[in-house]
Amino acid sequence: MSISIQTEDFDLAREYEGLRQDAGDPGAIVTFTGLVREIYDASAEPGPENRILSLTLEHYPGMTEKCLQQILDNARQRWDLLACRIIHRVGKLQPHEQIVFVGAASSHRQHAFEAASYLMDYLKSTAPFWKKQETPVDSHWVQARESDAEAIARWQASHSGD
């Protein structure tokens, strides 16, 4: 069960193999890789104001790791997990670059699927990362989306104590 906050990219095959080794004898490994989008809001009118040139992520060292560890610990309490991994990149990233990796290994596929989804929802909603988008028109801080808050509400409704 490990977390990394880093500027450098990560190797998906190596991370998968690491989960497989750490888990021992898993029945399922579920991974998710998030990428920097070229267009932030696909439902918006096409135009230069919606095209992303770069995304800069900032965090508070120490506080961020503590939050990510708590997210992992909560997932371990909810599901029978053999191994978990979270990688979140910080710094200036370009469209199509990898930004986040979440992996969950379990004896049971449903536990791995649910845990990976939970980890990603909580990362997106509660982890202290700040994102600044640069477009051809301006640069601005990305605001939380209502759908992220709704995802957390669903997890909390399905299990008290989060």
Image: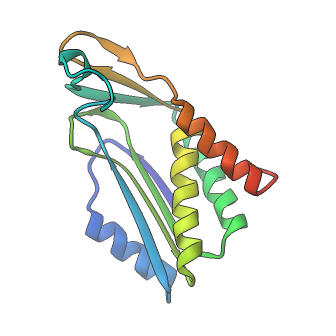
Which residue is located at x 55 percent, y 48 percent? Answer: 121
Which residue is located at x 51 percent, y 41 percent? Answer: 124
Quarter of the image with the N terminus is: bottom right
Picture coordinates of residue 2, whole percent (x, y): 51, 61
Is residue 1 something that shows in the picture?
Answer: no
Q: Say above or below: 32 vs 145.
A: below
Hey, which residue is sitting farthest bottom in the picture? 25
Which residue is located at x 37 percent, y 45 percent? Answer: 6
Picture coordinates of residue 94, whole percent (x, y): 21, 34
Picture coordinates of residue 113, whole percent (x, y): 52, 68
Picture coordinates of residue 143, whole percent (x, y): 48, 23
Q: Nearer the viewer, residue 143 or 154?
A: 154
Q: Is residue 15 left or right of residue 66?
A: left
Hey, which residue is sitting farthest right in the picture? 160
Is residue 93 something that shows in the picture?
Answer: yes
Hey, which residue is sitting farthest top in the picture? 137
Q: Is residue 143 left or right of residue 138?
A: right
Which residue is located at x 42 percent, y 80 percent? Answer: 20
How many numbered marks does the figure carry? 0
